[in-house]
Structure formats: C-alpha cells, structure tokens
Image (cartoon, helix red, strand yellow):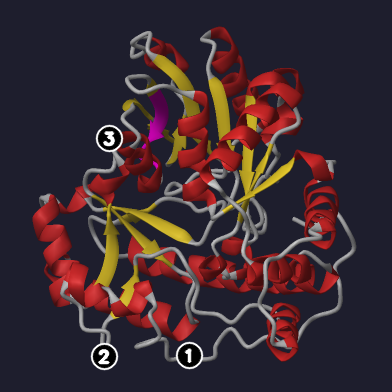
Amino acid sequence: MSLTKPAPRTAVDFDEQIDRVGTACSKWDDMQKYYGVDPADGIPMWVADMDFRPPAVVQNAVEAVARHGIYGYPGGNAAYTDAICWWMQHRHGWQVQPDWIMTVHGLVNGTALCVDAFTQPGDAVVLMTPVYHGFARVIRANGRDVTEFPLVQAEGEYRMDWEGWAALMTGRERMLVLCSPHNPGGRVWSEAELRQVAEFCAAHDMILVSDEIHHDLVMPGAPRHMATALAAPEIESRLVTLTAATKTFNIAGAHIGNIIVSDPELRGAMAQKLAALGISPGLFGLHMVAAAYSPEGAAWVDELVAYLDGNRRDFDKAVNAIPGLRSMPLQSTYLAWVDFSGTGMDQDEIRRRIAEDAGIAASDGISFGQGGEQFMRFNLATTHARVQDAVARLARAFGDLQ
C-alpha cells in the first residue's frame, strides 16, 4: 500500500504475451532440463520472476546508458542511495540514511554474506520452514547448519509457534533469517509477530536478518507490511535488513540488492566483509534502481499489484474447486502455495501429474524445508490468459478426483 497519493496511471499492458524462449532466461529455457516440460507448449510457474516488462522509466534509463556507450567502473552512487531512501520513506514510512546502505549482488548473495560475516563454521542458523529454499542452500554451503522451526497452520494461514520452537534450539544458533513477507506462504507478518521474532533473537543472542524483498507486493485488503526495523527498533544492534528493487520491478537480472544496517558496529563488520571479497555494484543496476524508485515506478507498482490480485483471485477460485487441492490465502508475493494433501497422493505422483499431465513447471514444496511436503508453489506473475490456461490444465490433470 502506498503512503502517498498514487501517481497517474501508466501505459502498461500486462496482458502482452512476450516470447522469452531462447533469451538465456532460466524460467523458460531451463524448465525442460529440470521438469521435462517443453517450453514450446509448457507453462513455467517455478522461478520467481515476472513475464512483464519493467516500467518505461527503467527501460529509458537502460537505453540512456546504452546511448552513452561507455561502460566503465561505476561511482558517484548518490542518485541510487537517495532513491532507496525516498522509496523506503514514501512507500514504507521507514527513514533510511544513505550511509546505512551497502550494495550486493542480489539478496541470495546478501544472505550468504550475512552468514559469512556474522557466524562461524559449525554455527547454526534458524529458518522458519517452509521458506525460500535459497536460504538453506547458502547456509549449508558456508559450512553452517540449519535449525528448522516448522510453522503451524491455523485458520488457513501460517502462524509462529514460539512455545514449540524454544525446545528446538541446540545452543549453536547465532542467526535467524526471517522472510518478511513470507515466501512461500504469502503471510504479511503483524507488528506483534515481528516483535516476537526480535525478542526471541535478543533472548538467545542471535543476529536477525530480515529479508523483505517482497515488501512492495502486498495484495489489496491485506495487512500493510511493516519493516522489522520499525516494529522493533530496540534491537538495532543485531538487526540486518535486506531489500531490493529486483522483485518489485522484474529486474532480477541486474543482480543488485541492499544490505541496510543502522548500527555502526554491525555495519562496519559487513563493510569489512564486502571489502575483503571485492563486492561492488554493476553499472546498469545502479541506473535501473535509481529510475525505478520514483513516482513513475510507484504508479507502475500500484497497477502491477492490482493485476496480480486479479490473477490471485481467479487462480484460487479455480484451484479450490478441484477436490483435494487448497490454495493458501495470499496476502503478499505473487507465489501461490497449494496444498495437495487432500488428494491422498504422494509427492512423486503430484509432481508427475503437474509436469507430465498438465505441462506445468512448478516448485516442489519439499525444497522449502519441513512443512513443505505435499505442497507445490506456483508463480502467478504472468498474463491472465496463461493463468487461466494453467488452472484449466490442473483441473484436467486431477480430473479423476472430481
């Protein structure tokens, strides 16, 4: 939800069918490799990027750099950091200072850097599962263990279970990575829940890394996203916030994101790690983000969210009409989390029907950790016509249950 008066509508055609096959696009060009789904007639609903062009203001910025024609080392990043500060203030009510911002190569990279900077090999990192699979991948690749806190379901949504989770602590946990809003469940955590997370981290002397990459993609009528930094300012000395424009504006290929740290000591430790690894931003990403975080970009996001909400409503209505399937109510993100447990099928049969019978590449729930069994994640950030095609295919693939 915007905190400012919406800008005028932009000329956006989210129904445009854009051919992405053969463009070195993971979402389309790798689905045959991983799912056996032919991109010629299949539907990719796995990788979390959108089949939409970014706002014209972003494209114009890229073209301006190309016209200039010199691609040297970037510097003078004030326009980039100022745009981030403006966006956080006007869209989220969070006043960020430019010197709090450190630029990394996307938020998987940012998470890995946090693990490397603030924990040691053999330490454990807490994840509330099921949760975005990239977190566990980089934690384990860094020689750390994962302590899984399984979320519980109540009234059709995920809830936190602090009483049960306290018993799962091993004493080796040094960090908790929070996904806010939550991927894949789509929850927008409340201020009270965020405070509980912060209090738990303080009580157990853990760094809290709050990944807020989906914070701009909140559905109409859902609770407003609150930055963890606003919900629990008293844990400033142990809080790291990760944000990016890449998910919001479909510019993930720019590989750019932000580590935002207000505490000087914590920020100094991260800055030292970035210097040690030679991490610096790319030229195009700086210009794309500076352009996106603007009134024009804000107007585009408002239209995007309205379009995604239409996809969400139609997808849920159709999927929930199939016996044995239930789509978790989506408050944020564009990622539908569908429970197939009511079918009585095992995960192999669920996957087979979706890939082979429906011709859809969807993310396997098991990859998101404990609690993901018998779930599948579907990316709805595509044309409405393609979403309608996908639910019709799913109805046919599970037609024997009707």
**Of circles 1 and 3, which is in front?**
1
For the C terminus, the quadrant is bottom left
The residue lying toward the viewer, choosing from 402 and 21, is 21
Q: CA distance from mark 3 to mark 2?
A: 34 Å
Q: Residue at x 82, y 45 (%)?
A: 98
User: In the rendered view, would you say 77 is above or below 8?
Assistant: above
Query: Are circles 3 and 2 on residues that touch, CB within 8 Å?
Result: no
Residue 301: give x, y in percent of width and height.
Answer: 70, 68
For the N terminus, the quadrant is bottom right
Residue 154: give x, y in percent of width and height.
Answer: 42, 33
Disc 1: which residue: 18
Amino acid type at image mark 1: Ile
Displayed quadrant of residue 264: top right
User: In the rendered view, would you say 371 is above or below 257?
Assistant: above
The residue lying toward the viewer, choosing from 379 and 98, is 98
* Left/right of residue 206 with respect to residue 400 in the rendered view: right
Disc 3: which residue: 370
Displayed quadrant of residue 19: bottom left
Q: Residue at x 26, y 78 (%)?
A: 393
Q: Which residues are magenta?
A: 125-131
Magenta segment's dominant SS is strand
* Left/right of residue 80 with respect to residue 167 in the rendered view: right
Displayed quadrant of residue 136: top left
